[in-house]
Amino acid sequence: MPEKRKDLFKGVFGDLEEFADLISNVLGCPITIEDGSHRLLAYSMHGDATDKARISTIIGRRVPEKVINSLWKEGILPALLREDAPIRVESISEVGLGNRAAVSIRKNNEVLGFIWALEVDKPFSDVDMEFLHLAAKEAKNQLLQHQIRKKKKEESYQEFLWQLLTGHYQTESDLEERLARFTFQMPDFFSILVFRFPLEITDELEQKISYMLTITQKVKVPFFTIDQNRLILLAGERDEQLFRSVVKEFIPYFVMQMKQRFGVEDIYGASGQIYHRLLNGVQSYQEALYVLKIKDIFQAETEKFYLFEELGIYQYLDVLSYYRKPMQTENVAIDKLKAYDAKHQTDLLNTLTVFLHKDSNPNEAAKSLHVHVNTLNYRLKRISEIGNISLKDPLQKIALFLHLKLLTYEAAEAKKKL
């Protein structure tokens, strides 16, 4: 590379727009500079030479999620995260991405950001690629300063979130006074989401989580924090119904993307109820934790449940369990079925449990039990006789269903205390 190119960066510090324009002038093409989570930091002037992906990035101040997804699928982002040298990027017409060259801005193994150069009249030469590599090295210090400012802001956000979750704020006016220090609009409706990871979340994993939360456009996440192996988010939206569907879609999406992109498995996610008042943050947080507990105890039944409101009767098991303990209430019918099963090596209590869980649908229950429906009907007749149960009485069935669930819940709670 000619020495004069190396001297171009002398005296350029602190102004990323000027830095982008300088690279653009040398290479004769539009330049964008992003942080490690694909948020736009600076861009050069481009005239008529641009593409849809670049325009969308500039308008939205971050790379569109569909573009990021395509870059992952094509192996481009994995290569940029892995490689130090610039790479050539073939066009992806479906997302409006033209031919490019790209390079990661690094501090050792940590990726601080990216420089993207849009190909205009001719392919980039080896000398151009070498200059792009030099530019990335020169940009390191500027992005380190940006990262320090960003970290301070995140620490302030995390402090607020913990204060919210632990009931520090007593009135809405206290909350509003604190929120006034932040530069964004809080959503009208929000809930607390909790993702439980299999192991404690390391700094490296936290960076990957932050990356995923920043690039996703499925849900707005103003605040998030880490508590050992838990990721805690405050997510929100202006429309309550839209937000409900967004949360239900986002939780499995986040779990899937963490597995596909970073190989992190066995993540479980849940959401508390949706509220309008931020003072309810404590309650939403506790509800999300409760959903995770119920999903652990009743795995098959709640596999597709993510929101507290989806739990139905499971919402009340902790309350029912607490208030029935002093009386040690027994259920005579269940005790009789237990005793009969133990004596005759039958499976009547499990048959009853499945039948009730399948909403008294004999065909569904028989399918789940892998028996013929006639066999099921015979068992139900014996259950009615032995337990003195009327399986046509909805009140009896509700009481039986609740008691069976409480037995499972309390057994799990007792095991946890051992």
Image (tube, rainbow, N blue to C red):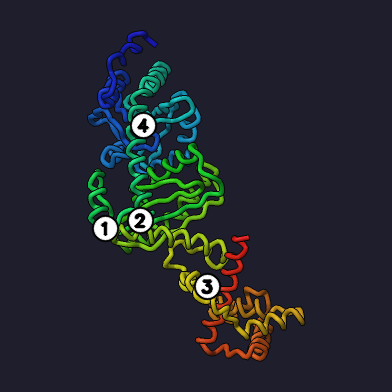
Mark closest to the chain's N terminus, 1 or 4: 4
Q: Label 1, label 3: how many angstroms apart (C-alpha)?
A: 32 Å
| Residue highlighted by disc 2 | 167
Observer able to see residue 337: yes
Q: Label 4, label 2: how many angstroms apart (C-alpha)?
A: 30 Å
Q: Any mark on residue 147, and which?
A: 4
Are the residues at dot 2 and dot 3 in contact (C-beta closer than 8 Å)?
no
Mark closest to the chain's N terminus, 2 or 3: 2
**Label 4, residues with CA under 10 Å away: few <14, some 14-19, many ≥20:** some
Mark closest to the chain's N terminus, 1 or 3: 1
Q: Label 1, label 4: how many angstroms apart (C-alpha)?
A: 34 Å
| Residue highlighted by disc 3 | 321
Q: Label 4, label 3: how many angstroms apart (C-alpha)?
A: 49 Å
Q: Residue 124 is drawn in which quadrant?
A: top left
Left or right of 340 in this view: 101? left
Q: Label 2, label 3: how many angstroms apart (C-alpha)?
A: 26 Å
Observer able to see residue 119: no
Q: Secondary structure at mark 3?
A: helix
**Label 1, residues with CA under 10 Å away: few <14, some 14-19, many ≥20:** few
Q: Secondary structure at mark 2?
A: loop
Of residue 36 and residue 80, the one placed in the foreground of this image is: 36
Q: Any mark on residue 171, and which?
A: 1
Q: Nearer the viewer, mark 4 or mark 3?
A: 3
203, above or below 308, in the image? above
Are the residues at dot 4 and dot 2 in contact (C-beta closer than 8 Å)?
no
Are the residues at dot 2 and dot 1 in contact (C-beta closer than 8 Å)?
no
